[in-house]
Amino acid sequence: MSDELILEIVTPEKMAFTGEVEEVTIPGTEGEFGVLRGHEPFLTSVDIGELSFQKEGKRTYYAVNTGYAEVTGGKVTVLIETAERSDTIDKDRAQKAKEKAEARLSQIEKDSAEFARIHAALVRAITRINVAGK
């Protein structure tokens, strides 16, 4: 069993976070899951949602996009398209993106190829709104 748990949140543009944490909660495509020190190794996909971790008794929140998470011994590596820490999210911009996506969804057919893309944009906007200010 490892004595530490290192978390890395990596996007194509940057290392959004790296450091030792006590626990991490990740929005998996099969449901939210948590990782503590000494967790069994596995690889899984990450869905749009809220990622959070606890460090020194304080919880930090990120709005994340899709990607993958790898748990190996004392390390969790999250490779995702985007990651925004809660205190950096522009809530007004997210609200406008939500309204725009809702308007677009009401104008297109559910079986259209564009529907899934716009629905994902709506879910991202809602996630950003929910995570903002946490």
Image (cartoon, grey):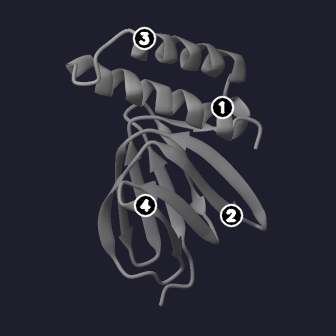
Q: What amino acid is at disc 4?
A: Gly
Residue 107 as seen in the image, left or right of residue 63? left
What residue type is disc 1 on? Ile
| On-image quarter of the C terminus | top right
Residue under pointer 2: 54
Q: Tell me if 23 is positioned left or right of 6 in this view.
A: right
Residue for badge 1: 129
Q: Residues within 10 Å of mark 4 (few under 14, many from 20)?
A: few
Residue 77's spot in the image, x, y percent? 41, 58
Q: Which residue is mark 4?
A: 31
Q: At 29% across and 65% down in the image, what residue appears? A: 43
CA–CA distance in space, label 4 to label 3: 28 Å
- Please tell me which of labels 2 and 4 falls first in the chain: 4
Marks 4, 3: nearer the viewer: 3
**First along the sequence among labels 4 and 3:** 4
Q: Where's residue 118, x and y in %?
A: 38, 21
Q: Position of residue 121 (x, y in %)?
A: 44, 25
**Label of residue 104 in the image:** 3
Please tell me which of labels 1 and 2 falls first in the chain: 2
User: Label 1 to label 2, Cα distance in Å?
Assistant: 21 Å
